[in-house]
Structure formats: structure tokens, C-alpha cells
Amino acid sequence: MAEIKDKKLVVVQLSGGNDALNTVIPYNDENYYDNRPQVHIDPEKALKLDSELAMNPSMTAIKRLWDEGKVAVLNGVGYPDPNRSHFRSMDIWHTAEPTKVLTEGWIGRALRDLDPKGDNVLGGINFGRGLPRAMSCPGVPVASVGDLDTYGLFPSVSNASDRNDILNVFSQMYGRGDGRDMVSEFLSQTGEDAMVGADILSEAPAKYSSSVEYAANPLASSLRDAARVMFADVGTRFFYTQHGSFDTHGGELPVHSKLWEDVSSSIGDFMDDVREHGHAESTAILVFSEFGRRIKDNGSGTDHGSGGVAFLIGDSVKGGMYGRYPSLKQNDQLNGDLYANNDFRSLYTNILEEWFDLDPVSIVNGTFEKFDIFE
Amino acid sequence: MTDKLHKTHATYDKTIGIVNNNPLGRGFAHPVDIASKNGELFVLNKHPAFTRVGVCNYEEDYLREFGTYGHGDGQFWLPTGIAVNDEGYVFVCDEFHNNVSVFRSSGEYVRNWGKQGSDLGELDGPSNIALSGNGNLFVVDQNNHRVQEFSTDGEFVNSLGEFGHGNGQLNQPWGIAIGKDGSIFVSDWGNDRIQQFDPAGEYVAIYGGPEENNGSLHRPSKPAVDRDGYVYVSDWGNESVKIYSPSGEHVQSLRGEATLSVWAQEFLDANPDESSQRDISDLMPELPDHFDTPYLISTQIESYFWGPSSVIIGEDGRLYVVESSRHRIQIYNVS
Amino acid sequence: MVTTENKIEQRSMMAHLMRRAGFGATQKELDTLETLDYEDVVDELLKPGQSNHMSDELILRYHTEVHEQRVGPWSAKQWLYRMVTTDTPIVEKIALFWHGIFATGYAKTNQARALMVQIDMFRKYGLGKFDILLEELAKDPAMIIWLDNQDNHKGAINENFGREILELFSMGIGNYTEDDIKECSRAFTGWTLKNAEYMSVRAMKDSIWPYGRISWHYEYRDSDHDSGPKTFLGETGNFNGGDIVGIISKQRAAAEFISRHLYDFFVADEVPVPQWPYTPPRDPEAIKLLSDVYIANNHDLTEVLRVLLKSDFFREARFERVKCPVEYVAGCLRVSNIVERPTLLMNDAVSVMEYMGQSLLNPPSVEGWHEGKEWINSGSIVERVNFAYDVWHNSESPEVKDVTDRLASRGTLDSLDAVEECLDFMGPLLFTEETAKQAIVDHVAKQGVIKFGDQNSDVREKAENRISEILALIASSKEYQRC
């Protein structure tokens, strides 16, 4: 009998505001072409999903997964009173709170609920440097791995034996002893956690063996790092990555196309890898962006708007369309933007409750509509 | 006989450009220099990550672009100067790579040359580049406080200038222009003046200088000279452009008076929430006293020059002023 | 008489003072400082003269984007250059202090130039009278947009600024009522910026079109000002904002709140600010003393800081603070003296502060950052240790060379002496756990004693390398995280 694995979520953040209209395209809607004279996708090239909607031509791998029924497309995602400032809107997605500024993230809270004592220092990993607010929660350890192969302390010491010596020194400097005070004790504990985490992670690359060749782009590298950590079975539940910049105010068509080529091929490769290693059924991938873009183009690109598209991808996901595709008709617009009708906190609620078996209400600051998105 | 103060030597024509914060596409991303050849304008962008050469024209058609951010062939890290010769070769100098890259005007990369150092023929922070009448290149070697002449293949020919504040000496020079007769004009940035050298490299004259008067300069970025010998200077530290007669007399100052370019208008048309507010705003307001430097004033008044990094006299005889912090080019007609 | 012991203590005291009132001092700077009287040094510090920082023009010419300062990190870079190269670091420390309290963030203002104008205002008014500082703050356009004061109208008030000026910027919860907040807000109606509506829609959309940002300045709209009678903190009058800040500044609650903040930033880490209403200060006597000075000197912040810096509780509070990322990075760069001309290394330095958890000019909310031990977590400790190690493991650093030269006069050094000398240079730092020091000593001993040779010799170069490694290891320690 196949081992039942803990459920995992991989988050791919599209930074900058992904243009939903050119991602999931209303290719039969006249309004689309009227509003996007310079910045529209050729309907001949778009990848048809059904009679109304098609995907950007660069999204071939995701289309393949759609055909297998493994892609949930969430149309018109957003939140009331949309904010069109990058930082603020991204913070809203990270903290699940549109009306006030919070510093605890939904993933940080989820990790706290999953592992209240913080026993596992690798429960949540950001594949990038710095700590995304989504994963921030007091007391919750998070590792930020810019590059798995060089991750850890003293990466600039290239000689392995020297580095080992220095790590030993570090370990003794941070070792528990008669620390002078509480802060010293805390520093010791944290230093140790960091070493333990780095130690465990340093073994992941050696354990990895795969037939999948990942595409050559930074997101693919991050997802490959995530895969290597996942297959090392160190107990990580949340894997966070980002790609960008999707802030296509100018030169949108070639830039957006390349970005989706990166994202789609990376996700395709990652899914192949996860399937090869038996983690497919326990892994779901969330793809989101902080807002969509304006309905009308500006001659070369598009400006900040609202109402985006999100994706949930995985072998345990019920593929299909979720949420209503926002109407492009003049009267249905929100000041020139798409009217979001699908609160992103619903999606979080589904993930937290159905996938992670957690109580979502305290994590997303409220109760939101659920829909059947997992098998 | 002194020249008359000719207040309308240059009159404003129009503005082209718009800011672009993407790796591709029309618009400018910290434009620092420009070259004019065969009806095309080659604009050099220095934005980290979005650096490139954007080719457009007076009519504001965006024709093509080339060069990307990186350390490989055909890539820039901190590009500072551009020149295009009659054969259609484009030369770009880079102050991080300490080299000169050569492209065809189509954008096809050809080669690069240059090496860091202070010996003759070596470069330390090349900040601008110009073509001389004999087809050679003059490169301003900023941190070596000199100007060096090379063949287009990078063979060292000659060096002029050395560190100092006296005649013929330079202090962190920035931009360069070559006159019709082969005179060499260098913006002697750290000495707040333009120095003119004859084709043999001998000191001839100074324009500007730091003394307090209307014609004074502060950290000028680049000179340009027209067929009549008038000298135009992008006075970077004063956020203005100063014009001198051939005898060195200051005849006009420009502060900038940008209007909406075609691309700018298209943006505003697509964003009525912004344009409606812009239309009822006072974009030339009086400022509180503590905004008392040209820089601070230019941050507040959008039509003024902000970061005028280069001026040229185009092939069409017009004055082009490139603003690195406003991502546009203001164009003036010259009498 | 100045004994050797006195001198060591004096030097150590000066190093402590310069870490707190600045970003640390080099050995050469300490050579001068240790000969001076401590109280005189404090008095001189509080009369900052010429800053002689690295020319902004040089920086703006090299980093063309810093000329525009479109986004937070570009402005942060200019500020970091200032911190690292200024002769008057106390001015930058004070600006950083107020930046953490009057926390205004790029995330919402989307206007980095205006944030730098605010920082300049802190430089100018940060050590003056508190009421003047508060009034400048209320007129600061970045603050206005940050707390929506452009939406605060006669007859339709917006309480955001009115609340925060009381709760977070002057007195703290429990020292005013909801009515006070409303009256305060009424008094600040009309305090807006020029072209407020256009600027505000641009801020909301993060607009840089068509020609980049347009910076902001204050405008007072008399027609929008509610000039009616108000009752605020027990006083009644037709108060305008200037009157309000005058009333606030006189309050004992303001004296205590600001004193506690000064203590927290300059003396020793307190608990996070949200806990202050429920947790007494760690040194109530100190807060009382500082509050008395505040009141006696008409809320003159220089006088409060003077008493603080000269006090015993300050002098004895060695290493009682965890360095915030800005202090950490600026300190490493400044003391190692490696920033001699504009360099792209500063791009990395700005990013790494963000990875350590402090995005300069972009605090996570108006509450600022959670400081003290909250800077430390398993992610940030890796960034901190790696950064400090790399900065110090650099034999080209003028400071490393200077330290090596000083040690060279001792002849040959065994590893224990070398490590102890380096611990003095870096602090002086005291490792309470013997095992910690021994670990470094044993590591150094593997390569034998350190020989110095002559100036510019190969032997000297090798010594510089070895000394830089010791300094780098010390910089990776727990103790170095504190100041």
C-alpha cells in the first residue's frame, strides 16, 4: 500500500500584477479586442480551454495539465475595494486582511497551527532570500534558501574542509552554556536551529536523482530546489517561490509571453518530477498575483488594475473553471478594471481546511465560501 | 565686439519619451546619452536591469532596441556614452566593464575592447565617447582624469589631460563633444567647467567655471557644439542647460519646459483617473522655502530638467536634451 | 592620573558610546577619543558640525537611479552611504530613531524622494524641541499621505493621523480619550499637500507616468480647516495643529513615552511597544530621570539625550541591545572602512538589510519594526553571520590592515593572544562561554603562530589574511550581534 504522505503546498507568487486578460483570454469577446487594440493575444495562437476562454500561447505545459483535469482556474479573484499598489496589495494577499495592516501571514499562522512547538525548523521554506510576510509569524522558524547548493552559513568559504572547520567554530560559539542572559540563550537556540536546518538541507542535493531536466530560468531553479528538499522528506509543508516582474506597463506582449513560458515550463517540469517521485497526490501548487491589470491598454502595455486569475494545480485537484469570468462590458467594469467576484480568502479557506485539515477562520480572519476543489 | 545676449537662440520645440520600467518596449529607462544618425536617434539607457539602446526618431516612432543587462558580449552593466559613425557602427562605453562595445546600427553585436587600469590605453570609469573627424574615438577616462583617443579597433593613439584644476587639467571629467574643426570639448565635471582643446590636444579655452554668475556651471555633464561654434552644456548640477557664444560669452540658460509627448498622451488617455486629476492640478506651483536647490525644485516641477545628462546637436541641427530622471528628451530649435 | 587600566576602560567606554551614538568607531578614531574627557565628548557630539560625507553628487553620478530615487531601495542606498561615511553619525542615528517611531513606509506612499525629505527633516529637527518636531511631522507630505490626512476634511474628519500622533508618536495608549482623537483630527484639517488629489491617486496606483515621480510639498487649505472651538487634553480653544502639538509636548505622558523610546533605542532593549501599557520599563528610575529633564528643559530633546549619554545606566549598558539590521550593516561597512568611492557593493548592502528583516524606508506598518531580540530568527541569523564574515574576511580593508599593523609591534603572536587582541578591537567583546573563545583559538592555532614581517612584505600580507579571518570569526559570534 502506498505510503500516505503529508500534504504540501507549493506557492508560486507572480510579482508585479499579472495581466489576467492575457493569461486566460476571452477570445470570443469583442470587448476584449476593442479594449486591447495594441496588447491582445492572437486568437489563432491561443490555447482553447472551452468555447469562451483560452490560455496564453506560452502556457503549453499548464494546458497539458488542464487537459488531464489537474488545473483549477480561479477567475475574477480579488477582494473588496481593490488596492492597486504593489506592496499593499501583495501584503493583503499575504496576510488575508484587506482592511488593515497585519504583520502575520496566513502561511505563518498555518505553520504555527501545524507545529505549535516549532519542532521542525524546516516546516516552511522560502526559496529566495528574505522572509515573505505570508510566512511571518512570531515563533515560527522559516528558512530562506536562495540557492540550495550553496545554502547555509559561510557559503563564501569555498574549500569544504575549511568551511567545516568554521562551522565547528560557529557551533561552539553558539553552543549552549552559561549564557549571560536570556538574549544570549535565544541567540544560541536560533544559531543552533539555523545550523540544524542547514545541515539537513545540505544533504538533500546528494539524495536527489531524477530524469527530469528543468528549464533554464530562475523559477525552474527554485522549483527544482523545492523538489530536492521535498524528496529528502524533511517534513516541509509549505514551499514558497516567486517570479517576475509581471508589471508590464510597456512592451507587454513579448515580456508577458516570456514570463509565462518560464512559469509554465517550470511548473510542467516540477509536476513531472513530483510524479516521478511519488509526491504527486500530496502536492498542490498555488499560482497567484497581487492584482490583475486594466482592461484598456496604454499603447504598449497595461497598467495596474484589479480582478486577477489564480491557479491551483495538482493530481489531487479537481480541474475546471471556478468563479465567474468578469464581464468586460462598460457597465460591468469597476472604474476601467475587472470586477473581482471571487474572494481569494475562499481559496485559502479551501486549502487550509480541505488540504491541511486546519481551522481556517482564525487564519484568514473570517469565514468564506467553500467550493469543492480537491478530489 | 561682444555678442548680444540672444535670449531666443534656442526655442522649445517638443518632448519625446516616457518612462519604461520593463526590460523591453518603448520608452526610456534612465537615458544618459544619445546619438543622431540617418534620421534615427540612439538613446542609451543606464537603468540597472533594464539597460539597453533604444532607437527612435524625432517623430517618436520606436524602431528597435538592443543590448541587455549582463556581463557577456553585447551586454552592459553601467553604460555611459554612445556614438554612431558614418559607417553605421555604434560605440557604447561602460564604466563598470571599463570597455567599449561595438554594434552595427541594426543592433548586431560586433566586438568589445578595453581593459581596466591607469596605464596609457587602459580605462578607469569611461564616462562618454565621441567620434573625431578622422574616424577615431575619444573616450573620457573619468577616474584617470584624462581623455584618450583610440582607433575604432581599440588601438591607443593619444592621451590628453591629467588630474588638476589648472588649464589643461581635468577633475573627474564626464562628457565630450568634437567640433567641426576637430576641437575637443570636455565637461570638466569636478572643476565645474567646460574645457576646449585644439585637435592636437592643447588647451584653448574655458566655458563656465564655478564663479557665481549667470554663466557659471555646477558639475556639468556634457558639452555640444554646433556648426557656428555655439557651445551648449547640460549643467547637471544646476538642472539646466547653458548656451555660450563662440567667444565664450553666456547667451542663454534653459531650465526646461517639457510638454506631453505622444507616448505620454497615450498613457494618460488610457488612464482617465490620473489624467482627470492631472488636468485640474497646478503643475508649476510655488514651493516652500526649504526646497532651495535646483535638484529639489526639479523633483517637484515636472516640466523642468531633472538629471540632464547629455546634450547633442542632432543631424537636423536641433538641440536634444536627455534627462536621466525624467526619462525623456526635450528638443529645441536653434537659430 | 590616567593609568593603563583607566585607558583601557576609557577606550572601551568610547567604543560603546560610538556604537550607540553612531555606527561604531575605528581604532584610529578611538585613539583620539580615549584621550578626551567623556563628558566633553558627549557635549561635542551633541553639537554636530560638518558631516563631510561622501559627495552626494559623486554617488548620484555613478548610481544614476539614485538621482531619481523612484523606489525605496534607491533612496535607502543614499542614506546608507551617508551613515557609513559621515563625520556626524549621531545625526543619522537620530534620523533612524525617529524613522522607527514616526514609521512612514514606501509601500503605501510609493514616493521615495518624499521619504528622504522626511529623513532630512529628522536630521534638522530631530534633536530640537519636541513640539517643533511634531509640527514639522504633521506638515510632512509623506506623513500626510501615509496617514491619509489629505482626506481629513472640515466636517468629514479622517482620524488616522489624529489617532496615531497620540498613540504612537507622542504619548501612548491610555493617555487620551477617543474624544481627544477626534478633536485632534479636527485641528489638523486642511493640513494637506499641493495637488493632493492628483498625488494621492498616483500614490495609490504607484504611478511613475509619464515622466517619473513628482515629489510633494505641504499646502495648508484654510477653507478646509475646521477652525471651531475644540477641547483637547483638558484645554479649550480654537486650536489649529500648531496648538495641539504644543499641548501634547507639555504632557508628562509625552515625556515618559519619548524617554522610554530614547532608552529603548540608545540604552537597552525594552519589550515591544504594544506591550508598554502593560509592562513597566526595565529601569523606571532612568525613565523618571529622563522625563524630569524633558519637562525641566521645555521638551528639548538634546538635553534629554545629553543626560542619557552621560548617565551611569547608559555607560553600564554594554551590549544590552541587539543591533538592528541597519546598525549591523552600516557598522560593518563603516568600521571596516571599505567604502572609499561609489560602489555597487552598496546595492547588495541595501538588499541584505532587507533579507535580515529591515527594509529601510519601508517599515511594515506605522508601528515600525519590532526590535530587539525579534530581529533574530533562524533565517536572519544566517544572513547576518554571512554578511559580517564576508565584510571582515577581507585583507584589503584599511581597518584590517591597521589592526594588523598594531599587532605587528608585538612581534610574533600566539593564537590565544591574537584572538584576545582581536576581541578587544571588535568590542571589546567578552565571550562568557570559555568554550566559544577556545574554539576560535584552536582554529587559529592550526596554522601556528602569527608572524608579521615588515610593512608591505609577503609575510605581512599573510598576517593580514590571518587577522582578517579572526576578525571575521569574531564578527560571526553571538556577542557581535549585540551592541
Image (cartoon, rainbow, N blue to C red):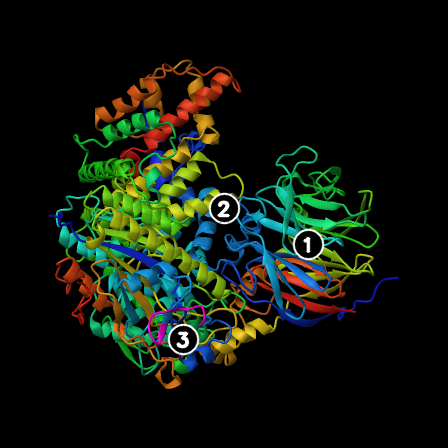
Give the letter of the chain under mark 3. A
Dot 1 alpha-carbon crowd within 10 angstroms: few under 14, some 14 to 19, many 20 or more: many
Residue nearer the viewer, A30 or B252: A30
Q: Is residue C238 magenta?
A: no
Q: Do the residues at pointers 2 and 3 share their chain?
A: no
Dot 2 alpha-carbon crowd within 10 angstroms: few under 14, some 14 to 19, many 20 or more: few
Residue C338, horizontal then vertical, whole percent = 47, 36
Give the letter of the chain under mark 2. C
Look at the picture and state if B178 lies above or below C457.
Answer: below
What is the three-letter code of the residue carrying label 2? Answer: Ser
Residue beneath label 3, please? Answer: A27
Give the label on residue B222, or none: 1
Look at the picture and state if A143 lies above or below C437.
Answer: below
Residue A316 placement: quadrant:
bottom left
What is the three-letter code of the residue carrying label 1? Answer: Lys
Q: Is residue C114 visible?
A: no
Q: Is residue C21 visible?
A: yes
Give the label on residue C51, or none: 2
Residue nearer the viewer, C171 or A221: A221
Q: Do the residues at pointers 1 and 2 share their chain?
A: no
Provide the secondary structure element on which disc 3 rests.
loop
Residue B11, horizontal then vertical, whole percent = 72, 71
| Outermost residue to the left | A1
Does the CB distance between marks 1 and 3 fall below 8 Å?
no
